[in-house]
Amino acid sequence: MKGDHGRFEALAGAVVLGEATAAERAAFDVHASTCATCAEDLAGAPLARAAIERAGAAETWRPSIGSLVLGRIRDGRRSRFRTTIGALGWAVAVSIVFNVALASGIASRFSPLGSGGDVTSGQTAMRIEFESPAPRLRAAVVSPRAAVAVAPRRARTVRPAVVARATPRPVSHPSVPVEPADDAANVLAGLDLDGPSDAKHVAIEPRPRCSPAAGSIAADATDDATRCAQNVRR
Amino acid sequence: MHDAYVLGLDRTLDADVRVERLVTEYETKLARYVRRFVSDGDFALDIVQDVFFAAYRMLRSDPARELTAGWLYKTATNHAISYLRKKKRRGETVPLGDDAGAFRTDESSAMQLDLQRALGALGEEQLACVLLTTYAGYSSAEAATILGTSADAVRQRVCRAMRTLRTSLGERA
Ligand SMILES: [Zn+2]
């Protein structure tokens, strides 16, 4: 056999499959006239091909696997559905428990300040509020001589008529008499500011000298409270 | 031309509906092809189920993807080759013993059985080329695409396979 005989095998394959062009067929015939192997391939291949085609035509086997395949698909889908429903169920259950806990006030029992309220000391009155979920500062003027503070947490009990939004626009401050410094200090001292409570975030308001803009409350209530306390003690 | 025929036609349909249509159209053709390949009806059915399930997973994850008959045959061929190689590694011969009955029930049973034994003597690559072209009806170019090779390589393997088959069938005749 010649070195490039593989090319003639490919040509023989094309002839057997009925794909050879006229030029390819002619080239193969020229080669087969001098090559015994290719001549045999050319003579014998149609026999083998015919045997395969006859076998295919005579097949009577008709398997039915549709129900198996679709059953497998349905099983997979059911399993995915169960997983999804399970996850949703857990989410709903957790949400219900959480909301019930909030609504019933159970959560507030774990706070040293409960659900907030009014605190008065001397001439200063202070209201503690809890708001949920996003901590937001809120100021409420409770009495003409009072300053107010806020801490994030839960139940909102402020009387709307006297609530002034802390952010973002500056609000002209009502003319409130500035309370004696000692009062504010007492109020702060009356709160358990060392305890693990959100009420530590206390801002004293209004105190023009404590706040950069009169009538507004700085975003960082803790800083303000600290600054105020320092001012008060001065 | 099989490959130009995009299966699972309507892409707005759910994957399971598209696969159901594929199964209806191809289960018999594909099962017979794979049974010829592995000479075992039960394993052929396992393989074909796997192929359709793979098609389902593919359509579910990527509904826009085109699915061709060539893909089904390619996947089935890969499974079949893998199955035969595992058998060879374990030193098992092509069965036919248990499954011969299945081939005998067909017409001209002796010829079927002889042919199946002759096919079983071919290497996997030659077997794939012969079955894809002469049994499944693909051209050498289409078979080349399915097998990831060239059309000339397919033709050459067909030629060599035919030589082996001719010898095997001639000896049995
Ligand atoms: Zn030659």
Image (cartoon, rainbow, N blue to C red):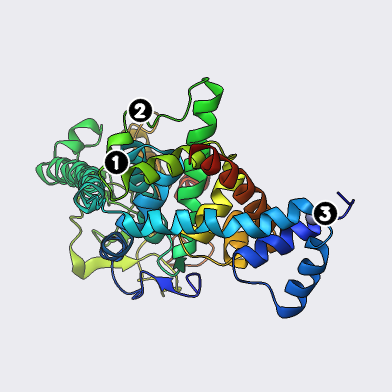
Of A16 and B87, which appears nearest the observer? A16
Please provide percent x and percent y for residue B69: 44, 64
- Return the residue found at the far top: B91
Dividing the image into four equal quarters, which quarter contains ligand 1? bottom right
Residue type at numbered disc 3: His
| Residue B171 against residue A29 in the figure, above or below | above
Structural crowding at the residue carrying mark 1, measured as other residues with C-alpha within 10 Å and reported as few (<14), some (14–19) or many (≥20): some
CB at disc 2 and ligand 1 closer than 8 Å: no
Query: In screen coordinates, is B97 left or right of B1?
Result: left
Query: In screen coordinates, is A42 left or right of A127?
Result: right
CB at disc 1 and ligand 1 closer than 8 Å: no
Provide the residue designation for mark 1. B104
Provide the residue designation for mark 2. B97
Residue type at numbered disc 2: Gly
Pointer 3 with pointer 1, Cβ within 8 A:
no
Provide the residue designation for mark 3. A5
CB at disc 3 and ligand 1 closer than 8 Å: yes
Instruction: Tell me if residue B30 can be seen.
Output: yes
| Picture residue at 45% right of the left edge, 49% below the top | B76
Among numbered discs 2 and 1, the one appearing first in the sequence: 2
Q: CA distance from mark 3 to mark 1?
A: 39 Å
Q: Which mark is residue B156?
A: none
Of B102 and B165, which appears nearest the observer? B165
Q: CA distance from mark 3 to mark 2?
A: 38 Å
The chain containing the residue under callout 2 comes to B
Please provide percent x and percent y for residue B135: 46, 58
State the SS at label 3: helix
The chain containing the residue under callout 3 comes to A
Query: In screen coordinates, is A4 left or right of A116?
Result: right
| Picture residue at 44% right of the left edge, 60% below the top | A217
Pointer 3 and pointer 2 on the same chain: no
